[in-house]
Amino acid sequence: MKLTIFNFLKILLLAAVLPACNKEENTSLQQLDMKNVSYGSNAAQTIDIYLPANRTTTDTKVVLFIHGGSWNAGDKADFAEAITAIRTQLPGYAIFNMNYRLANSANRFPAQSDDIQSALDFIKSKASDYKIDANTVGLVGASAGAHLALLQAYRFNTNGNIKAVVDLFGPTDLTTLYNNHPISQASQPVLVNLLGATPATNPTLYQQASPINYVTASSVPTLIFHGTDDFIVPINQSITLRTKLQTANVPVQYVSYTAEGHGWVGANLVDTYTKAVAFIKQYVK
């Protein structure tokens, strides 16, 4: 076909219009919520997905929530209230809330860490479909979920996609937790159920499962929350982590709530939401 001035102008016009059409298509996307989506073959491997309106693969970053429950209990529903509160303050973020295989004789560690990685791989595989940036991820975990989030961020973040982690009273040194817990008769069976061993019988496994052992100068920024009266995960677990992060010159924010235990409500919970949102906006961008 002869390239006339008229055809040439049409080509230029299409080149200008097509990107605008694609942009219009992305900005017209509606909010989309999906519950109990499978990210693996096990029945426990499900994830809830909250996609914002007007999302794009360049601007819509990811926040992944990981529930607690002593590794052997709990459910993603435990974060339902928090997600409702935080979502309104993070309208441009895609939020994922996952379940994982709970620890028992058939699902010892590292099954739980493997599930975190599988969920992240699933999110990555769906980035184009969901119109999100799966290369920019923040992790939020509570208690056992915070332990898994910290371990993922410090030890397994090989591609650098995890940019920050929010730690709500998570265990950081499992050897110390086993040997020095104030209520050892309650804490030690929980750790043995997770790891299938004690520090005496398998010290290497306890070392490998402890996030504090993987702190380096390149570790991601970390926000730590803990109650001073927490008897389930003693506050020294967080204080020691803070000190090691500071020594390594890693950005760390530490918030302690006087007379609070393993979780809190009211004004302190609102403060937690506010600080977590500000932290995510600062580092997951």
Image (tube, grey):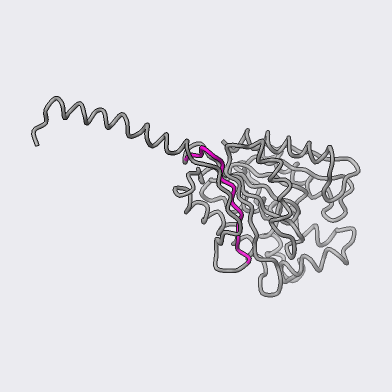
Q: Residue furthest bottom?
A: 105
**Residue 284 image-quadrant placement:** top right
Where are the magenta residues, as a range? 44-56
Q: Is residue 46 left or right of residue 8?
A: right
Q: Is residue 20 left or right of residue 61?
A: left
Q: Is residue 222 above or below residue 237?
A: above
- The percent position of residue 215, horizontal first and vertical second, equals 66, 47
Q: Is residue 97 above or below residue 256?
A: below
- The percent position of residue 62, horizontal first and vertical second, equals 57, 44
- The percent position of residue 210, horizontal first and vertical second, equals 70, 56
- The percent position of residue 64, horizontal first and vertical second, equals 62, 49
Is residue 45 rendered magenta in the image? yes
Which quarter of the rendered picture does the N terminus lie within?
A: top left
Query: Which of 56/177 is in front?
Result: 56
Is residue 260 rendered magenta in the image? no
Query: Which of 210/268 is in front?
Result: 268
Query: Which of 131/170 is in front?
Result: 131
